[in-house]
Image: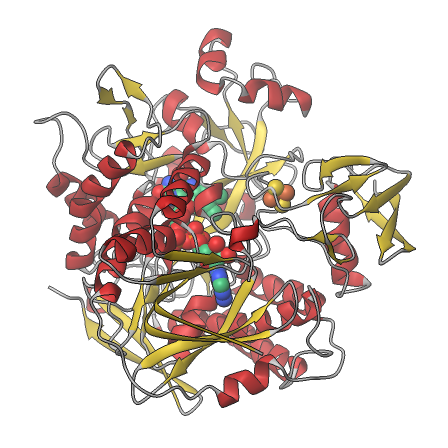
Amino acid sequence: MSEVAVLVIERGGQAERFEVAFEAGQSVLDGLRLIRATVDPGLAFRYSCLNANACKECMMVLDGKVIYACTARLEAREMRLGPLPNKALVRDLVTAIAPPDERL
Amino acid sequence: MRHLSTGVLIIGAGGAGMYAAIEAARLGADVLLVDRSLIGRGGATVMAQMTVAAAVGPAGSDHWTHHLADTLAAGRGLCDPALARLLCEDGVEVIREMDSWRVGWARDGAEFRSVQAPGHDRARCVYVDFLSTGPAVSKTLRAVVQRTPGITRIGDVLVTDLVMGDGAVTGAVGTHIETGEVLTIAARATIIATGGLTRLYRRNSASANMGGDGYALALRAGAELIDMEFVQFFPIGHLAPRLIGMDPIMWDPFRYKLGGRLLNGLGEAFVDRYGSTDDGKYVITRDLATYAITKEVEAGRGSPHGGAWLSFRHIAPEALREAFGPVIGKLAAAGIDLGRDDIEVAPIAHYHMGGIRVDTAMATGVPGLFAAGEAVGGANGANRLSGNAITEALAFGRAAGRSAAGFAGGSGFRADEAVGLAGAEGPACDTAALFVRLQAVMADYVGPFRTAAGLAMALEAVLGLRAEIGAAPPGRPGPYDLARVDWFDLRQALLVAECVIVAASVRCESRGAHQREDYPSMDEAWRLNQVLRLADGALTVTRRAVAA
Ligand SMILES: Cc1cc2nc3c(=O)[nH]c(=O)nc-3n(C[C@H](O)[C@H](O)[C@H](O)COP(=O)(O)OP(=O)(O)OC[C@H]3O[C@@H](n4cnc5c(N)ncnc54)[C@H](O)[C@@H]3O)c2cc1C
Ligand code: FES
């Protein structure tokens, strides 16, 4: 019983639409990873622990609210994703989140 | 291109890398700690949720020699006893030092509270409640790293090759992921602390950064790998219903506390059919549980999603609430009530016993190159006891930091080829899809149960994937280009996969985590370690008597 979510992703000022099939219970991060594996391997977002909510790297904005992509659930509707607003943009959904003294 | 230089370069900021950094710096070395992710966030250490084994009980209640005896028995005859001893003996000191840094081990009065995990002869596994062991270990080490003078930390640095000088490792080449800039790093000594390889499998407990990079880095620099065929599967990884925000290995600590029962698809207890028991106490070892669940599924007695049921329904609600603490609420949010519902579990790739061959100083045999943590092989032989991996990371990290700080350094810095590759421009390539294909091959043919025919197919598939990725990463260097990052990951992962497959093909017996369906019994003549080397682009395997 897979449903379809429409992820509208802000990429360098442009919004891009992706449709992803998903099973109930999957996360937004699952959807983003599926886009990379099937449509666009260049889509950029940060994540390490995938599911554990331990690395805290997957923060982004969903419909105006800051979320962790690995704990926000995919839903069968249009979901708008963008990078964190208060950090320097690196690419797509990636911002410079490392503490200043841990950057190159 | 940017050039950095340091005394001790540490690649990977998990438990091993951070402990190494602290030890090297307090011995006076100038340290550069890099990680492909954020410092202290990218690997297994921060994700660990369970327990840490060390003989830290009150005087007379335990001794590291008992821990060592259990570790050697679990390793099915293949442990390097000197490395296993280092884990158990120095483990006590590092766990105590972590306590002095206020990691917050759960206590009963003045003593550490501990549980008895399967394979241990007594309660020896300390933890930070509830499911917070790894985050607490990581956070504590990060804080000490930050306040120890002499340590520079840089995240988003993906190391792609080591640099050789005149017969010694003299630094590394990498990519700064955030900008895409190529980096060269000169170092007197280098420590690989990159963790394990379980991302090579479809179902795993890994982070995105556990594709076995360190094994490939070491191999390409001339170091040896040992016991690469022994990948540990965690038998009761969460399978269904889908749970987010919790690690798939989360059920184990509750098994320690409450026992719990495994049931097959017919609702029958079954581990007794495979020579273990499950009556209220959690004693079954990881290799046996993996075997029992897999065989039940094969016999058509699996749970709906192809695993087994884990049941806590027989436990009183108050006991559930006490053991699970706040986790009960998280489960409720996912619609799970353990008093009413069983959950489905199945084996998932979890830890790698094999790795870089080192001595007790964590020296690899290549001057200037050291390794620590899960990247190292040998201490746990053919099967690891639960709780031993974090202890290994901390104790071996400390040892590596000490050795690297005392290493005088080599000369020469031949980085041209590696720099060329890091900046190379190649054709477009669906690298994320290729990685998924690699995971399928490894899961289908190189999982816990293997056959000659399956391994041959896996090898052919891996060589095919290598041809598909070509000789250069897609596109040109740019900021946060995951397609390129995946290409570098595939380059390493395909070499590491080949190592696992080749070692598994040669070992014609079943032992610990390596089970051959075509050679189902353990063979005393195979009480040997296999050592891999890369010479002129070709892998060679040799057999060595187990160290005395
Ligand atoms: C979910 C989970 C739960 C676990 N629970 C327990 C437990 O309860 N008890 C126990 O004893 N063990 C447990 N283990 C095993 C244990 O956590 C690990 O074996 C141990 O933490 C490894 O530590 P490490 O420092 O060697 O590697 P890691 O902590 O994995 O760190 C390696 C670091 O290297 C970085 N890295 C990798 N490649 C590169 C590269 N090319 N360039 C730069 N950086 C790189 C990674 O980003 C990562 O940060 C668990 C493992 C997992 C996955
Ligand atoms: S991916 Fe690690 S917290 Fe979300």
In the image, is B75 to the left or to the right of A4? left
Asked if residue B538 can be seen in this view, the reply is yes
Q: Quadrant of the N terminus of chain B?
A: bottom right
Asked if residue B290 can be seen in this view, the reply is no
Residue at 14 percent of width and 40 percent of height: B64
**Location of residue B513 in the rendering, given as x and y in whole percent from the top left corner:** 37, 55
In the figure, residue B99 lies in which quadrant? top left
Residue at 19 percent of width and 40 percent of height: B92
**Location of residue B273 in the rendering, given as x and y in whole percent from the top left corner:** 39, 37
- Vertical comparison of B283 with B350: above or below: above
Residue at 9 percent of width and 27 percent of height: B59
Q: Quadrant of ligand 2?
A: top right
Front-lying residue, B61 or B78: B61
In the figure, residue B245 lies in which quadrant? top right
Q: Quadrant of the C terminus of chain B?
A: bottom left
In the image, is B546 to the left or to the right of B170? left
Front-lying residue, B470 or B422: B422
In the figure, residue B536 lies in which quadrant? bottom left
Front-lying residue, B488 or B334: B488
